[in-house]
Amino acid sequence: MKEHISLSINIEPLSKINPLIGRYKCNVAAVDIKANGFIFHKDILEKMIPTLQGSPILTYYSEIDDKFGGHEGDCYKSGITQKIVQTPELSAIGFVNHLDTPTF
């Protein structure tokens, strides 16, 4: 089973484009932290930056935890009980603006 980790993220204040669409800036990766069995080094993440533009933001909503989850795969440990549950089908909840230039 894949390892599930929590990362501290910074999200800038949301700016509303219209009642259904908001825009914000956030971190999407962490350097040298093991996530799902992988460690991403800074040079690799820098090479990945161009692939983000226009990409969908995928997640699922966990009714058990009452929050959005990640996109880690088939099974994960959920909540305080660490019960193993299957990831629901992922949904696109947004996208990375193709006009923005992601930065490290």
Image (tube, helix red, strand yellow):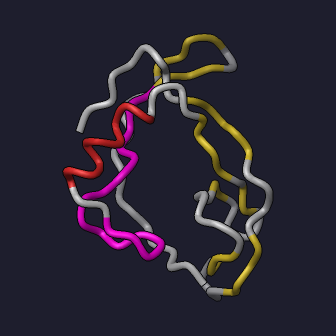
Along the line of sight, the residue nearer the viewer: 56 or 14: 56
Residue 12, how many percent across, how many down? 36, 33
Q: Which secondary structure class fits the magenta region best?
A: loop
Residue 65 sits in quarter: bottom right
* In magenta segment, residue 32: yes
Q: Is 81 drawn above or below residue 37 in the view shown?
A: below
Along the line of sight, the residue nearer the viewer: 16 or 87: 87
Residue 50 sits in quarter: top left
- Position of the N terminus, as image quadrant, is bottom right
Residue 74, how many percent across, how many down? 71, 71
Q: Residue at x 55, y 79 (%)?
A: 2
Residue 54, how many percent across, how many down? 53, 25
Residue 32 sits in quarter: bottom left
Q: Residue at x 69, y 86 (%)?
A: 83
Q: Is residue 30 left or right of residue 37?
A: left
- Position of the C terminus, as image quadrant, is top left
Q: Is residue 31 left or right of residue 62?
A: left
Residue 16, how many percent across, how many down? 54, 16
Q: Is 92 drawn above or below residue 14 in the view shown?
A: below
Q: Residue at x 35, y 73 (%)?
A: 34
Q: Residue at x 62, y 20 (%)?
A: 21
Q: Is 48 drawn above or below residue 39 in the view shown?
A: above
Number of numbered discs present? 0
Along the line of sight, the residue nearer the viewer: 97 or 16: 97
Q: The magenta stretch spans which residues? A: 24-39
Along the line of sight, the residue nearer the viewer: 51 or 74: 51
